[in-house]
């Protein structure tokens, strides 16, 4: 009797990805937006830990906090007040992004912080010429100094998200295996296609990253099955499981790959970094 066909959930996480060789030169960077209009999907956590994982493999990484909540900055232990932020760069108060770049405690990982001031950017920029291309102009000044630039977007599809997508080469969509976040993916992909058609022809959907995965629940497995059916190889083999250690790392202001390197979530992010390199998304 033939063996029953394995489900997508059973196949998930079965591939191996070799540790990539460290680059001998750096730049130009591939700019990637971490984007999902729904909050609480693990977007900032993935940005922090994927950035740290790529840095551990010798890549020079710049993480751009593009969310007024400043979660990425806090999660990396970076000050967000009384320092230059992405907001000052967006409104032109600062011209050189290097003035706002902060070195984190993780070697190879830098950040441009954000705080609540960024929430005023959309109002300030509403009458600016080519307002959707301002972030692209900022990152263009440092693109040759990094291998990867990760833009952690706010949970919205407003002007800031449009700026991020206009500046990017690719988009990563963190997505929990839950029905409600799944419903919003179609709208996000439609927005990505509009940006590609009208503003940024080079923009591509790099893939969907499964977060908060819990293989014990039938609902999780069913959602993953549906994602695999609809998006195929666009769903990354590497998945990020639920763990209490990630909030602990955030409180400590460190990536999980630094705070608890032997934790399953740390290895999952390291594996995700290897998969991005294996797929050619990151050099």
Image (cartoon, helix red, strand yellow):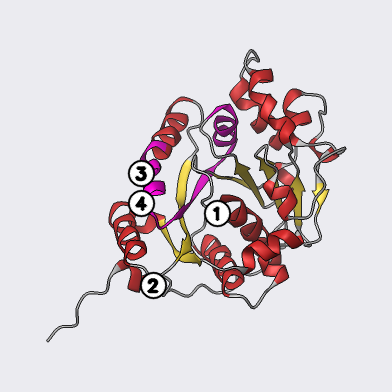
Could you tell me which secondary element the residue under label 4 belongs to? helix
Q: Which of the marked residues, 3 or 2, is nearer the chain's N terminus?
A: 3
The verdict on residue 65 being magenta is: no
Among numbered discs 1 and 4, the one appearing first in the sequence: 1
Disc 2 is placed on an element classified as loop
Q: Can residue 22 be seen in this view?
A: no
Tag 3, which secondary structure? helix
Q: Give the farthest residue toward the bottom.
A: 1
Residue extent of the magenta highlight: 158-187
Q: Distance between the residues labelled 3 and 2?
A: 22 Å
Which residue shows up at 59% across the image and 36% down it?
Answer: 164
Residue, disc 4: 179
- Using residue 64 as the reference point, say whether residue 94 is left or right of it: right
Q: Residue 216 carries which label?
A: 2
User: To which residue does mark 3 refer?
Assistant: 183
In the image, taking residue 269 as reference, residue 83 lies left or right, namely right
Closer to the N terminus: mark 2 or mark 4? Answer: 4
Residue at image location 39% in from the left, 35% down from the top: 190
Q: Where is residue 206 in the image (x, y as percent from the top left)?
A: 47, 50
**Residue 77 appears in which quarter of the rendering?**
bottom right
Q: Cα distance, mark 1 to mark 4?
A: 15 Å
The reply to whether the magenta stretch includes residue 170 is yes
Mark 2 in CB contact with mark 4 (< 8 angstroms): no
Q: Does residue 226 appear left or right of residue 94 in this picture? A: left
Marking on residue 42: 1
What residue do we see at 68% from left, 25% from top? 121
Q: Which of marks 1 and 3 is nearer the N terminus?
A: 1
Q: How crowded is mark 3: few (under 14 residues within 10 Å), some or many (20 or more)?
A: few
């Amino acid at each position: 009797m033939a063996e029953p066909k394995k489900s997508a959930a059973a196949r998930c996480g079965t591939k191996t990805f070799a540790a990539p060789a460290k680059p001998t030169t750096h730049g130009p960077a591939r700019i990637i937006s971490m984007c999902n209009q729904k909050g609480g999907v693990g977007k900032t956590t993935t940005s922090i830990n994927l950035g740290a994982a790529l840095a551990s493999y010798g890549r020079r990484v710049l993480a751009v906090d593009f969310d007024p909540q400043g979660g990425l900055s806090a999660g990396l232990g970076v000050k967000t007040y009384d320092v230059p932020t992405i907001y000052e760069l967006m409104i032109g108060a600062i011209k050189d992004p290097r003035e706002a770049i902060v070195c984190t405690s993780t070697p190879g990982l830098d950040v441009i912080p954000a705080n609540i001031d960024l929430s005023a950017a959309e109002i300030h920029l509403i009458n600016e010429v080519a307002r959707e291309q301002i972030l692209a102009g900022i990152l263009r000044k440092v693109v040759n100094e990094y291998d990867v630039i990760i833009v952690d977007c706010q949970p919205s599809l407003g002007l800031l998200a449009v700026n991020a997508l206009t500046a990017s080469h690719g988009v990563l969509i963190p997505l929990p295996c839950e029905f409600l976040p799944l419903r919003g993916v179609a709208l996000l992909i439609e927005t990505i296609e509009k940006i590609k058609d009208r503003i940024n022809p080079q923009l591509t959907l790099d893939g969907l990253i499964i977060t908060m995965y819990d293989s014990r629940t039938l609902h999780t497995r069913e959602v993953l099955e549906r994602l695999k059916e609809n998006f195929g190889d666009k769903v990354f083999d590497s998945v990020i499981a639920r763990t209490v250690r990630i909030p602990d790392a955030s409180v400590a202001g460190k990536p999980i790959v630094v705070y608890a390197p032997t934790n399953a979530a740390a290895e999952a992010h390291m594996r995700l970094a290897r998969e991005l390199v294996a797929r050619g998304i990151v050099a």
